[in-house]
Image (cartoon, helix red, strand yellow):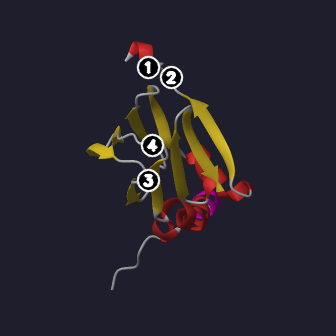
Amino acid sequence: MKTLKQDMFVISAPRILLLMMLVASSEAIFDKKNVTIRNEIPGETINIQCYSSEDNLGSHDLAYGASYSWDFRVNIWATTKFWCDFTTKHGSGNYGVYTRNLDELCNGLFQWLVKENGLCLIMNALDDKLYCQHWKKSPSLL
């Protein structure tokens, strides 16, 4: 029986450390994420079109009080981002609805509220405080 070279089984300390870090962080990175967008503009139907670099979720009309929701997992490189184009009678714009930085504020649950003056994110990691952004384009520019 031939003996195997000893160096074939040598794994360097930095590689072991890297492997341990990947396994430890992969749980948080690969947990399922959820984005929900709810129309809170009374008497108005809005249009949203959401997408990432890997997926196009299509165009959706949301009546007042209606929601659109989807689940996903972050890619292996942790570079997944989702954007949505919003069109309302009060304004419009393109907004990032999922980024890794936002995950720290939302714990994997991204709840967006579409309001007359813009878009608001419920930050459940900060006692449900709202992070709001005004419309990027006013209705006169639509």
Residue 29 is situated, as x and y percent measured from the top left of the image, at 53, 59
Q: CA distance from mark 1 to mark 2?
A: 10 Å
Magenta span contains residue 14: yes
Toward the viewer: 39 or 11? 39
The answer to whether residue 127 shows anywhere in this view is yes
**Residue at image mark 2:** 136
**Residue at image mark 1:** 139
**Residue at image mark 3:** 65
Please give the name of the residue rendered at 52% of the width and 48% of the height, measured from the top-left corner.
112
Say which of marks 3 and 2 sits in front. 3
Q: Which residues are magenta?
A: 13-17
Q: CA distance from mark 1 to mark 3?
A: 21 Å
- N-terminal of the pair, mark 2 or mark 4, is 4
Disc 2 crowd, CA 10 A, few/some/many (<14, 14-19, 20+): few
**Residue at image mark 4:** 81
Q: Amino acid at mark 4?
A: Lys
Toward the viewer: 85 or 14? 85
Q: Amino acid at mark 1?
A: Pro
